[in-house]
Image (cartoon, rainbow, N blue to C red):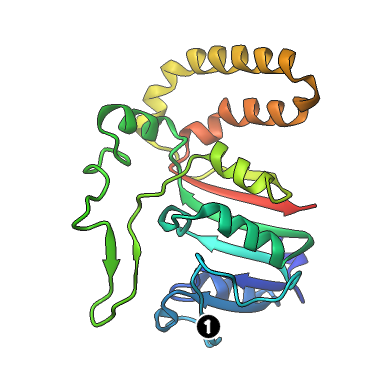
Amino acid sequence: HASQLPGKSVYDLSAGSGYIAGLFQAQGAHVHLFDLFPDQNKRSDLHCEKIDLQKPFPIADAAADIVICSETMEHLPDQHHFFRETARILKTGGRLLLTTPNTSSLRSRLAQFLGESEHYRPPLPNEHDAFVRWPGRTDGYFGKIFLSGLLRLRLLAALQGLRIDRVVKTRVSSTSQLLLITYPLIWFFSWRNYRRQLRAHPEQRTALTEIFQLNTSTGVLLSKHLIVEWVKG
């Protein structure tokens, strides 16, 4: 909430042009910009530092009230490392705001079934175009070959003590709306698995209930993108 931002330490780990950081700065937050390519920062007057999200973050423990990572997770081979480092730099009660393509949507599930691709696009990059290099540079990043659904992201975050506070609904996919005809099946099989696991592991009720709710959420199933907010502790 904007009223809670003044004075907060915000770390944008995928600052890009600096647009999102500027929004937080305008609300009175102390914003720190990082990106693999700092010279992308054209829309913020703040200094942007270089960061490789697959290496230890150059940020002190418990430094951040809020960490932002926008449209980057799908490019990271070691997502476990990302969540471990993010949890390290977050204060207790701090929040991670993450956006990524929604591979948990009905449209994405159909695309995976039909051609193992994202949203009816061509198949995943092959060895000739999997790694993207910027003109005149030797470093770069992987394309969208590490897409993760919400349940996998939830697990990786939970292992580091981060729990989902909310999943924000985004623009609805018309294809996913048409595929809602399959919702009764999704709900039935999710419920059946939930009940079976609960009988076998009653001590896991909280986690199993959250997984069931996420897997049957129409907001998740219909949205084109995931915007997820985690809290530490």
Res. 130 image quadrant: bottom left
Q: Where is residue 139 shown, x and y percent of the image?
A: 33, 75
Left or right: where 185 falls relative to 125:
right
Which residue is at a point 47% across and 39% down the rendered structure image? 223
139 or 7: nearer the viewer: 139
Image height check: is 135 above or below 201? below
Residue type indicated by callout 1 = Glu
Which residue is at a point 56% across and 36% down the rendered structure image? 151
Which residue is at a point 39% across and 37% down the rendered structure image? 173
Q: Where is residue 86 shown, x and y percent of the image?
A: 64, 62
141 or 167: nearer the viewer: 141
Q: Residue furthest left?
A: 128
Q: Where is residue 123 shown, x and y percent of the image?
A: 23, 42
168 or 3: nearer the viewer: 168
Image height check: is 112 above or below 49? above
Quick one: label 1, few (<14), some, or many (20+) residues within 10 Å? some
Left or right: where 113 falls relative to 191:
left
140 or 213: nearer the viewer: 140
Count of numbered circles in the view = 1
Q: Where is residue 59 shown, x and y percent of the image?
A: 65, 76
Q: Quadrant of the N terminus?
A: bottom right
* Residue on which the image places disc 1: 49
Which residue is at a point 46% across and 59% down the rendered structure image? 72
